[in-house]
Image (cartoon, helix red, strand yellow):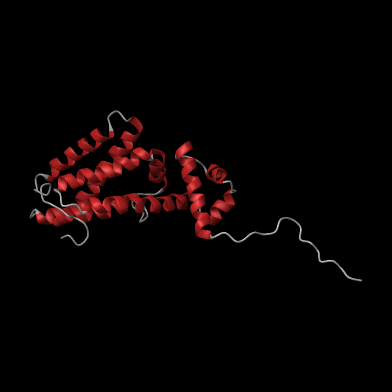
Amino acid sequence: MTTKARRPVGRPRGPRRDPTERREELLDACERAIRAKGPDLPMAELAAEAGVTRPILYDNIGDRDAIAAALARRYTGNLGEALGPVVAREAPFADVLRHGIGVFCHFVDREPELWRFLQVATPPTHDDSIEQAVARVLATALRTALGRAGADPDLADVWAPAILGAVFLAAGTWSISRRISRQELVDQITELLVGGLAATGAHTVSGPFGEGSR
């Protein structure tokens, strides 16, 4: 007597998904949810947008802070690519600063809900934060400009985070009120900052100001 092989119950298992690809798909879904519903979404709603349960979201990415860190890394890379050509320009530092502020304000304008999510969930001192990534670019550029102007380059250690604080807070507040145009926002922030830099002459020195430009 022969016995038939037992047929497995349910659908056959498909090929195993690439973990990195799966993670990126889940992050895309988290972005969509944040854009649509704001920065205060609980994990359950982030998971629902991705069509998975909370445990699956936790297993693939982590908790809310981990999601924010992953999204910050994604947008830090985008901002870094955008700011690289800015500091590489052969232009006065004031113009480079204006252009850099414009790049950042464009990001906040385009992604206000995501920006607020990253602000709440990723502390500014975190290595993965957008603040730290932009701070490194600005500190290098400012140190170079101050040195070329004959001023103390170490001023950049205090001035760079002070500049970033002003830009980030002004852009974040503007993204809610929008009482002026984005270009007016960029112009007014730049005017304020260049006024302070004028005392050192750093605003008039020419670039490039990136790594290796000193």
- In the image: residue 102, left or right of residue 119: left
Q: Is residue 168 above or below residue 21?
A: above
Report x, y in % for residue 127.
35, 56
Q: Is residue 212 above or below residue 191?
A: below
Q: Is residue 144 visible?
A: yes
Q: Tell which of 109 and 37 is nearer to you.
A: 109
Report x, y in % for residue 10.
74, 55
Q: Is residue 157 visible?
A: no
Q: Quadrant of the C terminus?
A: bottom left
Q: Quadrant of the N terminus?
A: bottom right
The residue drawn where x is 79% and y is 61% is 7
Report x, y in % for residue 110.
36, 39
Report x, y in % for residue 151.
9, 54
Q: How many marks?
A: 0
The residue drawn where x is 17% and y is 38% is 191
- In the image: residue 199, left or right of residue 2: left
Q: Tell which of 4 and 22 is nearer to you.
A: 4
Q: Tell which of 99 and 193 is nearer to you.
A: 99
| Residue farthest along the right direction in this orientation | 1
| Residue farthest along the top direction in this orientation | 179
